[in-house]
Image (cartoon, rainbow, N blue to C red):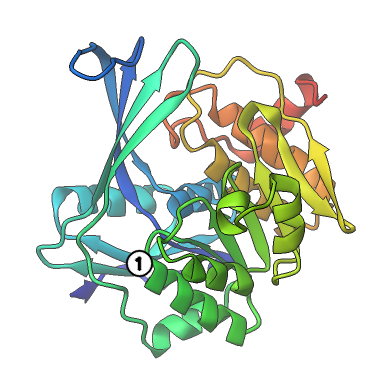
Amino acid sequence: MRYSMQNKPSNPNVIGVGHLCYDHICIIKNYPSENTSTHIEKIYNQPGGAASQAIATLARLGEKTGYLGCIGDDDVGMFLYDNCKKEGIDVSHVQIIPKGISSTSFVLVNTSNANRTLFSYHDKLPPYKFIQDDEEYISKAKIIHIDGTMYENAYNAAIIARNAKIQVSLDGCSMQEDNLKNLALVELADILIMNETYPTRLIKGSNRENAMLKIATLGPKIVISTSGDQGCLAVLNGTVKSFPAYKIHPIDTTGAGDAFHGAFLFGLLHDYSLEYSINFASAVAAINCMSIGGRNGLPDLDSVKQFMTYYPYI
């Protein structure tokens, strides 16, 4: 195992710890049933993964970001490493594992409705080995953004962040089979943004709204659950409030929730109100849905401002 070689960067404001993968995005006209076939019209290859997509979103918006985690020294790992550097993401705390097998996903995108189906092959890599230098790196950030794909990495990073009084942001999407582990991450989080099903999978026997209210008592100060073109729900002053999505004609919804999460963190870092941060994040997610793949459509800050000027937020 070795660390990546990079000149000492300025300290990132947000550090991502979580899934980083190579997405093969396959464009199809319709999904086949079992024992049948369909044609792939185009294939796009891009980086993906919940935490890394959120960090890339922040980087595109102009924020200083870093990624902490492991990749293999295979072609996939080197592609992901090079792309992070291209995006301006600090990779000085990436551990490169000799003969390691990095994560790959196949994403089938149905162009008739912009929905996608994901097939993930998770990496065969050991947990990240935290040393004192990593703790100092985390302690200088403002937010640590984690997902639950590699539990040990996420938990250890969150503990270090909490001890250093650094905010912890959790992507509520990937879940461990042991729900106690999911609850442990939620209890460490200050900011929790989940997909539509996460609340009721975490809090059994409850509807979505009541589950969110329960989750808000476990530790997170911000609790949001996204629903694609239906907008999102957020806990505000002890009640669940609904926020709309921008009305667009999507091409591909891959990575939209991750883009929302990264953009929401950008809003918090720049002292936007909770409501405006949701509005801003919804705009970034909408823009991202108008391109193929999770990474290609990520906008810069000027593009978001222009979009919000001309598109209605109803």
| Corner quadrant of residue 213 | bottom right
Quadrant of the snapshot with the N terminus: bottom left
Q: On the picture, is 162 further left or further right than 120?
A: right
User: Which residue is drawn at the image coordinates 57% and 44% (left, top)?
Assistant: 197
Q: Amino acid at mark 1?
A: Gly
Give the crowd class for mark 1: few <14, some 14-19, many >=20 residues within 10 Å.
Answer: many
- According to the picture, the residue beneath numbered tag 1 turns out to be 69
Q: Viewer-proximal residue, 173 or 105?
A: 173
Q: Position of residue 62 (x, y in %)?
A: 59, 50
Quick one: SS at disc 1?
A: strand
The vertical placement of 159 against 52, above or below, is: below
Q: Is residue 62 visible?
A: no
Q: Position of residue 103 (x, y in %)?
A: 26, 51
Q: On the picture, is 34 further left or further right than 250?
A: left
Quadrant of the snapshot with the C terminus: top right
Q: Position of residue 26 (x, y in %)?
A: 30, 23
The vertical placement of 158 against 259, above or below, is: below
Q: Position of residue 39 (x, y in %)?
A: 23, 11
Residue extending furthest left? Answer: 99
Q: On the picture, is 220 further left or further right than 140?
A: right
Residue extending furthest front? Answer: 205
Q: Is residue 236 visible?
A: yes
**Count of marks, rendered view:** 1
Q: On the picture, is 3 further left or further right than 132?
A: left
User: Which residue is drawn at the image coordinates 54% and 73% (left, top)?
Assistant: 184
User: Which residue is drawn at the image coordinates 62% and 72% (left, top)?
Assistant: 187
Residue extending furthest right? Answer: 237
Q: Viewer-proximal residue, 79 or 185?
A: 185
Q: Viewer-proximal residue, 211 or 113?
A: 211
